[in-house]
Image (cartoon, rainbow, N blue to C red):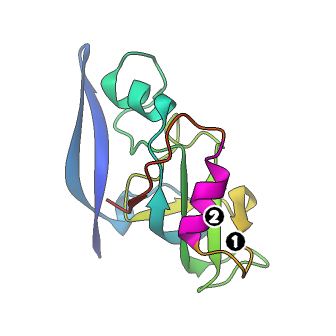
Amino acid sequence: MTFKALLTSKTGELISTNLVNLNDQDLMPGDVTVRIEYSNVNYKDAMAVSGRSPIIRQFPLIPGIDFAGIVESSTYPGIVAGDRVLANGWGLSQTWHGGFAQKARVSGDWLIKVPQMFSTKEAMAIGTAGYTSNAGCAGA
């Protein structure tokens, strides 16, 4: 199944980011696949996609240092399809596909279940309180 993502590539010294269609096979290995609902744009993400700082260390890569969404599939103990989760850090947008996509596949160790009292949008807003910008955006 295809999904949309922002993909950052590097050719020589030129870094470019484009909206592309990817397949589940394009995701990185992991035991949990998440349908991303929200991510945020912060200073580090802007530096990554502009090439002003060597944030992204592996190309091509989906930027976005965090995301929140709904688990589509999981083989990780304690995380099941339908769970609402968020991820932040763990190399997202550096060496691992990040949150500027409609899907992600990661290790279940990287995920935090969103408490029932919060939506995934609220969880992203709370989680980004220390960032430079809180411009939540629905998955690509």
Q: Residue at x 69, y 62 (%)?
A: 111
Tell whether position 31 is magenta: no
Q: Residues within 10 Å of mark 2 (few under 14, many from 20)?
A: many
**Residues at badges 2 and 1 in contact (C-beta under 8 Å)?**
yes
Residue 25 percent location from the top left of the image: 37, 64
In the rendered view, does 132 fall on the left or right side of 74? Answer: left
Residue corresponding to mark 2: 123
Depicted 116 relative to depicted 50: above or below: below
- Most foreground residue, 16 or 124: 124
The residue lying toward the viewer, choosing from 105 and 42, is: 42
Residue, far right = 78
Q: Is 135 positioned to the left or the right of 129 in the image?
A: left
| Left/right of residue 120 with respect to residue 140 in the rendered view | right
**In which quadrant will I find the N terminus?**
bottom left
Magenta: main secondary structure: helix
Based on the picture, tell me whether residue 122 belongs to the magenta stretch.
yes
Q: Which mark is residue 114?
A: 1
Residue 138 visible in image: yes
Whichever of labels 2 and 1 marks the residue nearer the N terminus, that label is 1
> Disc 2 and disc 1: Cα gap in Å?
7 Å
Residue drawn at the location 43% of the way across and 49% of the way down:
135
On residue 71, the disc is: none
Q: Amino acid at mark 2?
A: Ala
**Which span of residues is magenta-colored?**
120-129
User: Mark 2, mark 1: which one is toward the viewer?
Assistant: 2
Q: Which residue type does callout 1 highlight?
A: Val
Tell me the element at label 2. Answer: helix
Q: Determine the image quadrant of residue 120.
A: bottom right
- Split into 4 quadrants, where in the image is the C terminus? bottom left
